[in-house]
Image: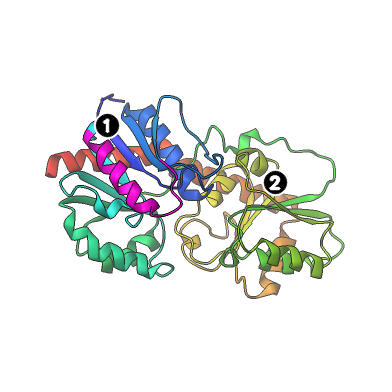
Amino acid sequence: MAKNKKRIVIISPYQFIERRGIERFVASLAVNLERFYGYDLIVYSWNAKAGNRSFFISSTIRVRKVPFCRYFQEKVAEFFYRFWLVIDRPDYILLNFLFHGEQSLPSRLKYLYILHYPASLLKHRYEFIRDKIEKFKNISFVAVSEMVKKEAVPYINGRKIDLIHNGVDLKIFNRNNRKESSAKRQLRIVTLAALEERKGIQFVIKALAKIKGKDFVYNVYGDGLYKQNLVSLIREMDLSNKVKINPSTERAAEVLTNSDIFCLLSKGEASPLALLEAMAAGCAVVVSQYSPFEEYVNAKRGCIVNREDSVSVVEAIDSLFDPNKRASLSLSGFEYVKKNFSWEKAVGQYYNILIEQDQTI
């Protein structure tokens, strides 16, 4: 592919503070824009108070960190962003937020705002976007799912929104890396998600309490304020020997490749990267009835359940004790992700949008 030395700045304030889908997305996007198109990448982020929790970053990608400040962190960020932009003179700036100092960026530069969250979940953020974007003369939008795009339309004042789904690194998350054992063993169920009530982990736990006479283990990887609620529920359901809450992990590929079923019964997702990675890694998947899951999962590629109906959840998980059904869903899900969600395809779409910006501005 054609190489170029154009410069992209990606602003990701929490890149070294959180381990969420957005931070993983930024890490992968930066690496692949550099890899496939030869862009010069710089990431602007905030310094962590204590220690780094980064997923990344390639040694060839520069990182600038706003100094940690207990108070007025956004105001400090505004100063450093504007100062660095004078030095770096980027051709494009990619935004993931607009309310952590980004609203004060220079109006004349070229921006691509990536919408990672649905308006139905965070209406106030979209109202903020609606009130601030008129200042920016050259700004385009990308939505990470059809649902996000549809819900964003009323807030972006008639501007175009492109759809680019999240990408998956198929060298790392790949069904062919699985080492299946023919021996009878525990069914391995997993969830990788922030520990929040909306993620629906509690519905999985309640369903597992009703599955009798089956050998399984359920590992949850994540951090968050809802952890104690889940720990209490595990004790209440008498599942302490079967359900484990683990810290969030940087070994997602290893965890998924060594699991049989991935459950994500959440409400309010935008484009669940962990789901696509689980499908690529060969897990059979169980998801809730809420959008945008229907964009990725159907009866051939997984199970969609009514998370508030414990019978629906129990029946779906119980059916996946059948190794033949798991294998069928696993293969179908892998082929679907391989065809539609490679990072090479995703960054190609970003490249086309950036080229279009050059031609129309």
Name the spot of residue 5 as percent of width and height, x first.
26, 25
- Residue 306 shown left or right of residue 359 in the figure: right
Residue 83 sits inside the magenta stretch: yes
Q: Amino acid at mark 2?
A: Ser
- Which region shows up in magenta? 67-86
Instruction: Judge whether residue 329 is colored magenta.
Output: no
Image quadrant in which the C terminus is located? top left
Q: Which residue is mark 1?
A: 7
Q: Main secondary structure of the magenta part?
A: helix
**Front residue of 250 and 259:** 250
- Residue sitting at x 67%, y 68%: 203
Whether residue 354 sits left or right of residue 27 in the image: it is: left
Relative vertical location of residue 64 with respect to residue 278 in this rendering, above or below: above
**Mark 2–mark 1 distance (CA, rounded to whole Å):** 40 Å
Q: Residues within 10 Å of mark 2 (few under 14, many from 20)?
A: many
Residue 309 against residue 169 in the figure, above or below = below
Q: Where 41 sits versus 299, above or below?
A: above
Residue 284: % across, % down: 64, 52
User: Who's the residue at 78% across and 53% down the image?
Assistant: 217
